[in-house]
């Protein structure tokens, strides 16, 4: 089996996947029909055709499209169907075996659903997918950095008041353009989340290498999403490598969303993932907004393997290391690892 096929066939986890951007087109159309949405078919189609926008306009188009897709979701049943559908997609496409899914509760504020209704819908979809495919899903509640910090505080209040075992951590998401969206503003929220036993991750794409210690010390992140700025400063790159923190990397979305304005994201020799690998940073492939950029977890492994000449042994090791990057408890990690090893033995014996 060649490495690309192996990337597809290997059992894999995905710990960087967003609910809204992973709504597939058919589900989006069905939600619009079911909810008698006024959103036009062409606005839905545009969400899956980001490459029609050039340069810096594409990133704004991406955030606008996320809002369009988010607005199609109205009910707990919609959330359940979306979760089931996005798990099913990657089970079929590339042998997904465990998922940690980002959800931004404020994206559904327009629906009038309560926080617990949102949780119920998501958990219902996760259970249905586990029944059908044996794939478990846990959730990471995301704070949007372009919303007031008070929203983040309220989200954490809700997570604490309505504790569900499937909601295992918090994330920080949204556009990184302005000073008021810098991670430092969320330090208190993260500190309190930690006190209450929630794991922590955060997106880190634009703010420079000097922000690294804000993520690792003030936010005390257990993982970092993307984290590409660490390559801009040799000592920071070294610290990132020595930290043992997993960095979730998503080559397709960076190429599609940022690659037109920033061509370095389109080429393996200049994509930050290359320097991270050479620097010894622990990278874990993820899908991000997979439906909008037409990818799946096997494709993300395959792109990185192709770009950086990974061997079959390398990608097998990456799939096993993915388990260590999850927020499962140690006994669940061990049992998932046993399943993976059994399947890998079968695959590589062929
Ligand atoms: Zn992301």
Image (spheres, rainbow, N blue to C red):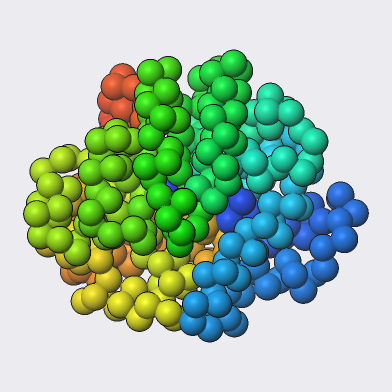
Q: Is residue 247 visible?
A: yes
For the image, the number of numbered tags is 0
Q: Position of residue 153 (x, y in %)?
A: 54, 30
Residue 2, above or below 317: below
Which picture quadrant has residue 310? bottom left
Quadrant of the frame with the N terminus: bottom left
- Residue at (45%, 62%) from the top-left corner? 177
Q: Position of residue 143 (x, y in %)?
A: 52, 40
Q: Is residue 346 visible?
A: no
- Residue at (30%, 54%) from the top-left corner? 227
- Residue at (52%, 70%) from the top-left corner? 59
Residue sitting at the far right: 36
Does residue 295 appear left or right of residue 323 in this picture? Answer: right
Q: Position of residue 272 (x, y in %)?
A: 25, 66
Quadrant of the frame with the C terminus: bottom left
Nearer-the-camera pick, 318 or 188: 188
Does residue 10 appear left or right of residue 64 in this picture? Answer: left
Does residue 103 appear left or right of residue 296 in this picture? Answer: right
Residue 272, above or below 289: below
Which picture quadrant has residue 150? top right
Residue 170, above or below 286: above
Q: Position of residue 105 (x, y in %)?
A: 63, 38
């Amino acid at each position: 089996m060649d490495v690309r096929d192996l990337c597809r066939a290997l059992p894999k986890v995905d710990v960087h996947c967003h609910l809204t951007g992973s709504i597939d087109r058919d589900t989006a159309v069905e939600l619009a029909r079911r909810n008698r949405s006024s959103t036009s078919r062409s606005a839905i189609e545009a969400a899956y055709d980001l490459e029609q926008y050039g340069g810096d306009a594409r990133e704004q188009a991406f955030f606008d499209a996320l809002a369009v897709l988010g607005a199609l979701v109205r009910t707990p049943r919609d959330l359940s169907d979306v979760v089931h559908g996005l798990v099913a997609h990657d089970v079929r496409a590339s042998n997904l075996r465990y998922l940690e899914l980002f959800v931004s509760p404020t994206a559904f504020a327009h629906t009038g659903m309560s926080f617990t209704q949102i949780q119920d819908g998501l958990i219902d979809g996760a259970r249905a997918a586990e029944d059908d495919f044996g794939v478990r899903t846990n959730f990471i509640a995301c704070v949007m950095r372009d919303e007031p910090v008070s929203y983040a505080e309220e989200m954490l209040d809700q997570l604490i008041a309505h504790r569900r075992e499937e909601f295992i951590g918090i994330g920080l998401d949204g556009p990184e353009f302005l000073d008021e969206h810098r991670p430092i503003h969320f330090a208190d929220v993260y500190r309190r989340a930690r006190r209450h036993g929630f794991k922590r991750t955060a997106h880190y794409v634009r703010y420079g290498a000097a922000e690294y210690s804000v993520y690792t010390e003030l936010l005390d992140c257990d993982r970092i999403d993307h984290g590409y700025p660490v390559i801009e400063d040799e000592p920071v790159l070294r610290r990132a490598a020595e930290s043992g923190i997993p960095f979730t990397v998503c080559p397709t979305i960076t190429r599609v969303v940022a690659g037109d304005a920033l061509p370095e994201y389109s080429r393996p020799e200049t994509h930050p993932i290359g320097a991270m690998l050479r620097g010894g940073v622990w990278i874990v492939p993820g899908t991000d907004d997979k439906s909008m950029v037409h990818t799946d977890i096997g494709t993300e492994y395959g792109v990185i393997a192709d770009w950086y000449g990974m061997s079959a042994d390398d990608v097998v090791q990456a799939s096993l290391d993915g388990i260590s990057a999850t927020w499962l408890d140690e006994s669940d990690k061990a049992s998932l690892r046993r399943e993976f090893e059994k399947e890998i033995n079968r695959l590589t014996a062929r």
